[in-house]
Amino acid sequence: MNQFEPYLPILEEALQKLDSWRVSYGKDTGSISDAQFEQIQKIADRLTVRLEGNYPFHHPGYAGQMLKPPHPVAWLSYALAMTINPNNHALDGGPPTSEMEKEVIQKMAAMIGYDSNSLGHLTSGGTIANLEALFIAREIHPKKAVAASANAHYTHQRMCHVLNCEFIKIPADHFGIPDIDFIKNNADQIGTIVVTLGTTGLGIVEPLQEILKVAKNNHIRVHADAAYGGFFKLISDELPSRRHWDYLSECDSIVIDPHKHGLQPYGCGSVLYKDAAVGKYFKHDSPYTYFTSDDLHLGEISLECSRAGASAAAFWSTLEFLPLTKSGLGSILASTINAANKFASRIKEESKWQLYRNPDLDIVAYFKEPNEKSILRLNQISHEIFDRGMNLGTSGYHLSLFKVPADEFLENFPDYQPNAEHAVILRSVFMKEEHEDFVDELVQRLTS
């Protein structure tokens, strides 16, 4: 039995019920001939072969990039809803899935501590979600810059270019912490500060509490990019950065990606605003939509138009199965934290292996020490380890590499020769709950 077989009867029964609903409107004209069915079967066979060229994202031996399959309830629900293909831009494009989207947004708002005066919606991903938040930032402070730390995702600088908005990069120290004094000294130029709760490089949780204090004193908006880390709010009392998560509700806007730790397929991000009044910046009209209901259409509070209603259906179903509680979705996040901490401890125990920093979340950075302590030799060894794991097949491992500016690396490890511009270290993302029970095996494969 394959891992998907137990779910197929559920999907088949659900499809049959939807077919009954379809037939109630009249004869289905979408049937295909035997020849067409055979052709589709051949295409599916060819597709299967091509898909086997992927890395094993499903397996705990893969701890490279932020990649993993969605939860079974998510892909099942997405597949079911996609047979209808609702569009959540306007209520007449998908009445049920639009309501589901509003419900999951309410749950996420409650999770971060926003009240009923907040506003939000799903997006096609974190990039668009951050674009929307920065669009609002520009509209509110049209003559001021957006600032983000040197460790922030590169999308912020790119989106500021799209928006023709000045971008200021805030320096960070060798621990990855933004320079608070730099923010104070440049406060008169800044309209919005982006604070990253879980950088995509090393999973660093930036000091939200301190930045909020500076921002309030200088009338600066704060946008939290919690695309990767947002759902860790559910278990924040167990994190070393716990004090910062308590202030999440004070941010003016927040981005969280359900397609990361929300267990969803790609095509599911979200943006939330503390004050619903920002909806006026999206105000527009359409000559052929928004007629079926006087209620707020999701397209009226979004820069995007067409969006898959199936994403809302999948996320809604997932939260019915794993609610936004510590014992629900939080239990899976706890496993990822346990895996990262366990792996970090094991690396510390291994001779010649070095932890780069203690993990804030579930991303671990580390390296193997060369006999000759030079950055150039370190880089060569990291590449060798990376390549070796990918070439061992089913008994191998999959990691990722991370470049650290040489001066930053030398602040932490000053006994290395500075003979390269960057230090290349190893990086592992433990975002699957299966990683918790696989750490010992992974370390053995890595260090043998």
Image (spheres, helix red, strand yellow):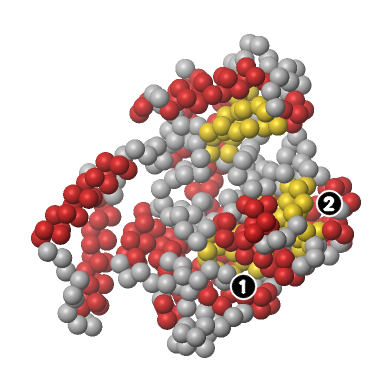
Residue 313 is situated, as x and y percent measured from the top left of the image, at: 41, 66
Instruction: Please state if 256 lies on the left or on the right of 434 as rendered.
Output: right
Instruction: Please state if 63 lies on the left or on the right of 405 as rendered.
Output: left
Residue 146 is situated, as x and y percent measured from the top left of the image, at: 75, 57
Tell me, for residue 63, which label it has, or none.
Answer: none
- What amino acid type is highlighted by mark number 2? Ile
404 shown above or below 216: above
Q: Residue at x 36, y 54 (%)?
A: 72
Instruction: Please state if 15 lies on the left or on the right of 441 as rendered.
Output: left
Residue 331 is situated, as x and y percent measured from the top left of the image, at: 51, 50
Tell me, for residue 183, which label it has, or none.
Answer: 2
Out of 113 and 353, give the one closest to the viewer: 353
Image quadrant of residue 132? bottom right
Residue 149 is situated, as x and y percent measured from the top left of the image, at: 73, 47
Look at the image and tell me whether residue 324 can be seen.
no
Regarding mark 1 in the picture, which secondary structure is present there? strand
Q: Do the residues labelled 1 and 2 touch (CB within 8 Å)?
A: no
**Dot 1 corresponds to which residue?**
119
